[in-house]
Image (cartoon, rainbow, N blue to C red):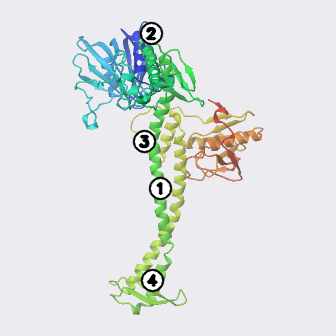
């Protein structure tokens, strides 16, 4: 991760100068792994975000206002008790590690001074926020309680002693040891730093190798003396920048405008453009706003996707089994033949006989062998075959009715899964969750949740100024097509596959408008990764919804089909109204 010990040092350097002697006026916990502290100092409020997220742990000032849950987390209530009104007395980093302690002074119920440390560990999946009593080092509580049952090498529980897990790596603030002097010869160059120096990440390790003009996959023992000099010199440059707080706040962006990386040490050798920021907080806030939203939505939608996928799999298995049963049921006529022939040849049958050979008057009197139950009479054997015939006839009727319903449900579930794959906003996720509750896929949560403002369809405009709307979920698809669209508007949909409903206003259309609408229908579908995609379009008046059909499921006629070349447009170049 880019948020390494060096970035942590830059954060501590900055917030220490701004927050010492500051008063914590408010404590919020918008997420189960995140704490927000409002600190007043020097006639200014600072909002310090501290996240113990497993995937995106971080600490920095933010201007983002997240909604807090209606019912506060227990940890939040406890932190309010100990932190609100407390004064920050010190902030420091452990060695060059991703561990920060915020020392505070507060008063207990009796008015006595109490000193605590809020320890922030930014360690990937081991990230945590821990409040400890300063003198005794006893843990008051942690945002993540850890016991030995979780195979952890230390407990983090209330009333246990806190211990910092110090490694034996080199602290560059206290040592001048050079990499060629301390690393094993078989070590790859980029591994030299994060295996031997505290706080170094792969990002900065690769930067040092690139500055030295060396392949970071080479081994240390393979370097010439001149290459070792370059290697050490590049390291010294970075080390001195860290010691002198010579920071550069920029994010590396690739050709698709995607955020690739960030650091506080200038990344000189990346072959991408950079976005520069005035301070570290602005940089981190920008970077993590982009990533945390996607990360959180991905985590929350993955559970729903698993539920839908499991249901699809169960339906598919059921379809397979029913298809086999249907084939068996269609063979039932032989059992009626057996029963009729037994009834006509009752005089030949007596108990103890396990088969009978008779002439089949249904097949030109050809001989046929009929299996019998030897412990039953001829009449009982005939009745058994009549019952089996009747049962299979009923079974075929039931299967014939059930198969299309399961197929339709799977079509709907595939559409639902496609919608979940494209979720980008909490409103959309909330609406899909509500949809899943209504159809019985999940149970309604007993917890009170704040009302979420409904999301709107995507809105695009062609160069001909024609409006095109794209549904984001099944209920939105229904509303867009069946309620909002005029009967002469154009309905567009990927052919025979899951995808969004696309509605194009029918206003002085030219061919380019149709091309854009069809591209959007292909792009917002399960076929978006294909090179060519078949898309149907028709007037909205030709679109109908069957009685009792699932959300988003419609049928249409009088349509045209086109084959869309997915390289013909760039989605980012089509004007979208946000």
Element at badge 3? loop
Kind of element beneath mark 1: helix
Label whose residue precedes the other's in the sequence (1 or 4): 1
- State the residue lying farthest toward the front: 225
- Give the alpha-carbon distance from disc 3 to disc 1, as whole Å: 23 Å
Identify residue for label 2: 44
Residues at circles 2 and 4 in contact by the CB criterion of under 8 Å: no
- Residue at the limit of the structure toward the bottom, as seen here: 347
Q: Mark 1 points at which residue?
A: 315
Does the rendering let one see residue 568?
A: yes
Nearest to N terminus: mark 3 or mark 4: 4
Is the C-beta separation of discs 1 and 4 under 8 Å?
Answer: no
Q: Mark 3 points at which residue?
A: 444
Residue 489 rendering spot, x and y as whole percentages: 71, 42
Q: Which numbered mark, 2 or 4, is in the foreground of this view?
A: 2
Residue 494 x/y as whole percent:
63, 47
Which sits earlier in the primary sequence, circle 2 or circle 4?
A: 2
Q: Is residue 437 visible?
A: no
- Gap between marks 1 and 2, in whole Å? 59 Å
Please give the residue where the numbered disc 4 appears in the rendered image: 339
The quadrant in which the C terminus is found is top right
């Amino acid at each position: 991760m880019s948020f390494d010990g060096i970035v942590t040092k830059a954060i501590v350097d900055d917030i220490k100068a701004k927050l010492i002697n500051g008063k914590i006026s408010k404590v919020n916990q918008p997420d189960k792994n995140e704490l927000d502290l409002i600190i007043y100092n020097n006639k200014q409020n600072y909002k310090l975000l501290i996240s113990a997220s497993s995937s995106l742990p971080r600490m920095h000032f933010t201007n983002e206002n997240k909604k807090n849950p209606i019912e506060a987390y227990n940890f939040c209530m406890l932190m309010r008790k100990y932190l609100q009104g407390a004064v920050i007395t010190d902030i420091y980093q452990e060695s060059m590690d991703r561990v920060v302690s915020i020392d505070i002074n507060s008063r207990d119920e009796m008015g006595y001074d109490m000193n605590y440390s809020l320890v922030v560990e930014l360690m990937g999946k081991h990230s945590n926020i821990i409040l400890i009593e300063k003198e005794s080092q006893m843990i008051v509580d942690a945002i993540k309680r850890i016991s030995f049952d979780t195979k952890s090498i230390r407990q983090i529980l209330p009333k246990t002693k806190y211990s910092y897990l110090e490694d034996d790596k080199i602290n560059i603030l206290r040592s001048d040891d050079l990499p060629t002097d301390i690393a094993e010869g078989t070590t790859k160059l980029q591994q030299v730093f994060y295996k031997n120096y505290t706080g170094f990440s792969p990002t900065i390790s690769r930067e040092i190798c690139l500055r030295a003009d060396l392949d970071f996959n080479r081994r240390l023992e393979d370097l010439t003396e001149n290459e070792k000099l370059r290697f050490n010199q590049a390291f010294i440059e970075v080390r001195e920048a860290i010691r002198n707080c010579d920071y550069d706040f920029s994010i590396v962006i690739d050709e698709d405008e995607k955020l690739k990386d960030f650091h506080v040490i200038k990344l000189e050798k990346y072959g991408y453009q950079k976005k520069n920021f005035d301070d570290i907080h602005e940089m981190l806030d920008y970077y993590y706003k982009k990533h945390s939203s996607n990360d959180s939505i991905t985590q929350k939608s993955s559970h729903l996707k698993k539920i839908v996928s499991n249901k699809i799999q169960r339906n598919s298995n059921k379809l397979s089994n029913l298809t086999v049963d249907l084939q068996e049921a269609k063979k039932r006529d032989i059992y009626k033949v057996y029963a009729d022939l037994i009834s006509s040849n009752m005089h030949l049958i007596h108990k103890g006989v396990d088969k009978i050979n008779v002439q089949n008057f249904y097949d030109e009197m050809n001989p046929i062998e009929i299996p019998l139950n030897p412990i039953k009479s001829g009449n009982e054997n005939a009745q058994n075959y009549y019952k089996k015939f009747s049962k299979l006839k009923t079974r075929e009727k039931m299967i014939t009715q059930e198969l299309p319903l399961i197929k339709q449900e799977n079509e709907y579930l595939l559409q639902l899964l496609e919608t979940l794959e494209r979720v980008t906003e909490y409103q959309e996720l909330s609406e899909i969750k509500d949809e899943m509750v209504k159809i019985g896929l999940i149970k309604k949560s007993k917890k009170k949740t704040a009302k979420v403002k409904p999301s709107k369809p995507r809105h695009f405009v062609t160069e001909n100024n024609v409006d095109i709307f794209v549904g984001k979920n099944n209920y939105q698809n229904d509303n867009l097509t069946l309620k909002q669209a005029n009967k002469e508007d154009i309905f567009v949909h990927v052919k025979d596959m899951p995808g969004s409903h696309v509605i194009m206003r029918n206003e002085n259309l030219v061919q380019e408008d149709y091309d854009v609408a069809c591209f959007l229908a292909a792009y917002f579908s399960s076929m978006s990764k294909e090179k060519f995609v078949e898309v149907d379009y028709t007037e909205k008046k030709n679109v109908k919804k069957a009685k009792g059909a699932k959300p988003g499921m419609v049928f249409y006629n009088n349509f045209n089909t086109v084959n869309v070349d997915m390289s013909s447009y760039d989605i980012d170049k089509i004007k979208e109204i946000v």
